[in-house]
Image (cartoon, rainbow, N blue to C red):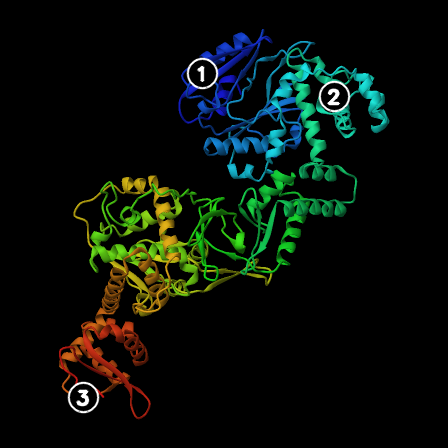
Amino acid sequence: MLTREFLNTVVTCPTAGYFCLAVSNGTGWLEEWHQWPQDIDKIVERAERAKDSANVYFSTYLFKAPQSKKENVLPTRTIQADLDDADVSNLPKAPTVLIETSPGRHQGYWVLDQELPSEQHEELSKKLTYAIPKCDRSGWPLGRKVRIPYTLNHKYLDGPKPVKIITDNPAAKYNPEEFEALPEVPNYTVEHFDNNFVEDATSTDLKEHPLEILERIKNDVPVRIYVQYTTRQDDRSEALWALMLWGFRAGLNRQEVFVLARASANNKFADLRYRADQDLAKDVLRAEHAVRSDQQDARSLVYNVLKSSAPVLDKKRSIYTIVIEELKKQGVFLHTQGGLGWYIRKDIGRPISITAGSEALQALLDVQFGLNATEPEARFVIHGLKAHVHNLPDNALQSALAYYDTTQRHLLIHTGRRVVLKVTSSSIEQIVDGAYNIVFPWIQSVEAFTPILSASNQIDWGKELFGTGTRGYGTSTDNITNMTPTQAMALMKVWLLFLLFRNAANTRPIIASFGQPGSGKTTLFKKVYTLLYGRHRSIGAVTTMDDFDHATASDPLVVLDNVDTWEKWLPDRIALSASTSDVVKRKLYTDLDVITLRRQAIVGVTAHNPKFGREDVADRFLLFTFKRFEQFFSEELILADIHQKRNAIWGAIIRDAQRVLQTPIPTTGVPQFRIEDFARYGLWIATAIGCQKDFSAAIEDVKSAQQSFSLEEDGLLVAAIMKFAAQAKDPTRHYTAGQMWSMLEGCADDTRSFQGIYRNSVLLSKKLNALQPALKKVVNITQTLNDAGARVWRINPKERTNGSEH
């Protein structure tokens, strides 16, 4: 990898900017500014010219102005670290590029697979820096400069050392979540680094001679520390580090330890031409922190166990003990009622599934403890964690997007990643994932959102999602034919808010959008998907039963688009998803252990020519029928507009959810609807947002549309019944199922199709019983039992009075 290729690999800012090349001859810095990327050849040529007489540095960060200030730093995908004396064979993640700046000293560059906001990027840089023992703690802030390869390091008295690339793998790009598993850096640790001490350590007015300091602590340090002070050791680094640690343990302050270390025969920094005292001062601070915190990082503990000569089983047990004790200190284990185990580290907030195949768990063990998933020690630890979590009480619940606690009357809303909001009638506050024993798993394809909750956010979220929006991009409510636009808006807003409270309801409606091609029914759901999931989730189609089960157990909303092709399993699964039901899966095909996933999603379907063949499915529909648009709008612009306003829309929705919590649940006036839970909770929501009349009227329109849909589904039978009713001569006569079968078969327009669909009198009787509420829309139909206890039917034309029905 040449200099040009190296720069193109590590300078990952997506936009043009100012590139800083800094040249120093030991007396000061000269910052030279170039335009990136057009000046890359000039940069390479200038570094080559300067290398023989000066140290040449650069920054992987670009700047928006030719000043190396933090506020000018542009976003990048590269984390850089000055590794100093770190053991590069034991890094949390192998760098994309590793550079040797002098024998035994290195720099690392890790390229991420996505760009992050500057503050998040800096947080990961800090965590990586502090997770690596003996790494330069001052190098994590944005905009810091490091050495450029193929130049010379002029710090050493015995001559310049080449700066060279040791390993490079441009294809190695890391997901930021892999670095989030690194230990959190406490504020006191960051504050401990004292740049003033580093720059001014030699200006101390300490008058005591180093040997006098040594004599003073002679009885408080091991004999070897005292003896080797004036004798150069083979491993000067280890000897110097031990001296500084014992100096602090003996009660010296940092100035005294600096003076003592500076005069030691093992002061390895004395060989530097430039900034020798500053580099020594950094090591003094590291030693002080190591003693003051009195802890060794878990990764090093595991590493020491692996290097020990203990029996294999004892090693595994020791490592498991280190891992579980560290994890308990940093987070919480939860066992859900479905049989799944989770671990949530408080600083990260991400629930990690405790299973053998969990990539997140494997990444955590690798990054935090140095345990590779392919090694037997890692497998031993994973099985130990599984046993631990399954011995816990199964008192946690897994949810998606939101969870409503009916007892404490608070609503938890998961924003997609770390932040969970607790909404009550009087407050909105941030809590950690796993609080109240509710686990919100992170889904990679879901973009996090940050709701704008300020009073200045006055966006009309219903108009943006279901109306024309502020830009006038199409509409959904004006294009619905089975209710008025005002009723449609009320019903849609109630439905979306009900989505947040859905776990409290035992039954949930199926959202059905039917209509001609080009009527906007799919676009409606795409807008809602953009709100819920962001840009990276598309509406699905009918695939397999297992896919459907997994989706309804994992997501808050699952929409099947263009359901015009018959799948035998689909009506059953849709009916199941409308109520509280479980999906039971065996963990392995070779054992009897099972996990139980609860269906939690509201299901939506779109179709041009729907055919389900199940009255109980249609009876659960929250049905919207759409007409074709006369004027079309760009779907790309519509969805981009929703995404741009996503945080504002969420802020307004959450404020409306809080209004719902402030409103008593109505006890009267609940509209009659098959999904009574939705009618009751819907009236509560509608009352809170001021549209209860339109909501109740919309429910009546939906019921009428359901009946029409059921009649259309069985059009052949309905036509035969109406023909039979028109020909009936005796309005008082009752017919058995067998008699009805014969007469309706004769009235059918297509006898062969009628026979194939309704097959026999038993099936016909069941169909008439199920269709009876809808059939009353077109005929007078009654059902009773005769003297023999058999079901009998009477059918008359709708317009005929039926005074003898007793």
Percent x, y of residue 805: 21, 86
Location of the C terminus (image quadrant)? bottom left
97 relative position to 488: left or right: right
- Circles 3 and 1: CB distance less than 8 Å? no
SS of the residue under disc 1: helix
Between disc 1 and disc 2, the foreground one is 2
Q: Which residue is mark 3?
A: 804
The crowd level at tag 3 (other Cα within 10 Å; few <14, some 14-19, many 20+) is few
Q: Which residue is mark 2?
A: 256
In the rendering, at what x and y percent does residue 519 appear? 22, 51
Disc 3 versus disc 1: nearer the observer: 3
**Between 29 and 47, the one nearer to me in the picture:** 29
Label 1 crowd bin: few (<14), some (14–19), many (20+), radius 10 Å: some
Q: Is residue 271 above or below residue 541?
A: above
Kind of residue at disc 2 = Glu
Residue type, numbered disc 3? Ser
Label 3 with label 2: CB-CB less than 8 Å:
no
- Tell me the mark number nearer the camera, choosing from 3 and 2: 2
Query: For residue 569, what is the image quadrant?
Result: bottom left
**How far is disc 3 from disc 2 in space, using C-alphas?**
111 Å
Q: Residue at x 64, y 58 (%)?
A: 391
Quarter location, residue 250: top right
Residue that carries the numbered disc 1 in the rendered image: 40
